[in-house]
Image (tube, rainbow, N blue to C red):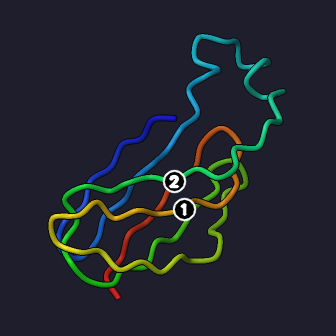
Amino acid sequence: MRGWGVAGRDGGLFWVQDFSLEGKSMDEIRSSQATRKNVRVDLVGMAAGPFTITPYDTWQGSYLSAISVTCTNSQPCTIELPDFKADMAFKIGRK
């Protein structure tokens, strides 16, 4: 897994991707139906406080149920992601 993101005091976004199919043809990528389960990410440098993380299924084009987290100063903010295939985007918003 790898991820990218940007966030400020009131929110931001991040995206995670299973890059095990990197370099494969689009047919191989599209035929991969493996579900990524039990993926956790640590967001470093988040402001302290409560946030809502809203997953966006990039393959279906729809938002999923929001996740509530509370971040603490000087600690990574750990988020358990919903099951997904290939990649997923996330919107971060301050509660």
* Up-down relation of residue 33 to residue 43 (above or below): above
Residue 24 % position (x, y): 67, 12
Q: Could you say which is closer to the camera, residue 27 or residue 2?
A: 2
Q: Could you say which is closer to the camera, residue 70 or residue 15?
A: 70
Image mark for residue 27 = none
Residue 27 % position (x, y): 79, 18
Which residue is denoted by mark 2 in the rendering? 40
Q: What residue type is labelled 1?
A: Glu
Which residue is denoted by mark 1 in the rendering? 80
Question: Is 27 positioned to the left or the right of 19 in the image?
Answer: right
Q: Which amino acid does label 2 sit on?
A: Arg
| Mark 1 residue crowding within 10 angstroms, few (<14) / some (14–19) / many (20+) | few
Quarter of the rendering occupied by the C terminus: bottom left
**Mark with earlier residue (2, 1):** 2
| Mark 2 residue crowding within 10 angstroms, few (<14) / some (14–19) / many (20+) | few
Q: In which quarter of the image is residue 9?
A: bottom left
* Up-down relation of residue 34 to residue 43 (above or below): above
Q: In which quarter of the image is residue 21?
A: top right
Q: Decide: marks 2, 1 in contact (CB < 8 A)? A: yes
* Up-down relation of residue 31 to residue 13 (above or below): above
Q: How many marks?
A: 2
* Up-down relation of residue 12 to residue 94 (above or below): above
Q: State the separation of the CA atoms marked 2 and 1.
A: 4 Å
Q: In which quarter of the image is residue 45?
A: bottom left
Residue in the image at 15% along x and 64% along y: 74
Element carrying mark 2: strand
